[in-house]
Amino acid sequence: MAKDLGQELENMEEAVENLKNKEFRILGIKVTFMSVSALVAVLGTIIGGLYFAFTMYQKIEEVAGLDVGAFEQRMEVIETQLDEALGYARDIKNDLRDDILGIEKSVDRTEDKVDALEEDVRESIQNAEERFENKRDALQNDYDTKANRLQDSNQNRMDDLEAKVERDLKDLEERLTNKLQRALDNPLAN
């Protein structure tokens, strides 16, 4: 089968080669396949050019037949609408600018209020710290004063107690000494 296909291709190739050189008679004129092909190409080009020219002519006629007045009226309406739209856009832009400026002023006022409030809070904290330190110092001084008084009081009591104990001891010693002396002086009393 491969040989048959190869053989058929070779036969077709030879037929095409022979067709190029083969001459025909058309209307009494000797022509080749190549000259017929060239003639068909030239005729196709001429017919295509004529068709293009005809369609261009139709389009030019359409454009020439348009009502220019209607287009001018339509353009005037469009220009009016465009002018109105530009006016609206300008108004919107101005309103937005005013709104933005108002917002900026509000933000500035708010920042100023926050700064003032922050300063007040700092002052309050500073005052509270000073009062706390003063109160702490006062409490420490009161504590120290009371502790010193208590220590002095205790010291005085201790001194008084020691003095009393010493007096009592001296008194006791004197009595004992007196009793002992009496006992020694009077050996018969016991």
Image (cartoon, helix red, strand yellow):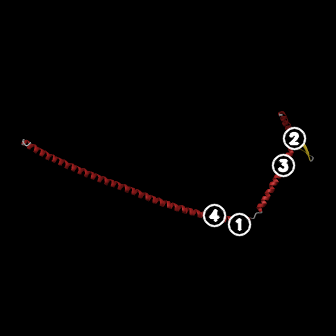
Which residue is at the far top?
3
Number of numbered discs visible in the structure rendering: 4
User: Is the residue marked by circle 3 packed among few (<14), some (14-19), or many (20+) residues within 10 Å?
Assistant: few
The image quarter containing residue 16 is: top right
In the image, residue 21 sits, relative to residue 159, either above or below, namely above
In the image, residue 14 sits, relative to residue 39, either above or below, namely above
User: Is the residue marked by circle 4 packed among few (<14), some (14-19), or many (20+) residues within 10 Å?
Assistant: few
Three-letter code for the amino acid on which mark 2 is drawn: Leu
Contact? badges 3 and 4 (CB < 8 Å): no
Q: Residue at x 21, y 50 (%)?
A: 157
Query: Looking at the image, is mark 2 or mark 1 earlier in the sequence?
Result: 2
In the image, residue 34 sits, relative to residue 112, either above or below, namely above
Contact? badges 2 and 1 (CB < 8 Å): no
Three-letter code for the amino acid on which mark 3 is drawn: Val
Of badges 1 and 4, the one in the foreground is 4
| Disc marking residue 85 | 4
Q: What residue is disc 3 on?
A: 42
Q: Whole-Å distance between the Cαs marked 3 and 4? A: 58 Å
The image quarter containing residue 73 is: bottom right
| Disc marking residue 145 | none
| Disc marking residue 19 | 2
Q: Whole-Å distance between the Cαs marked 1 and 3? A: 49 Å
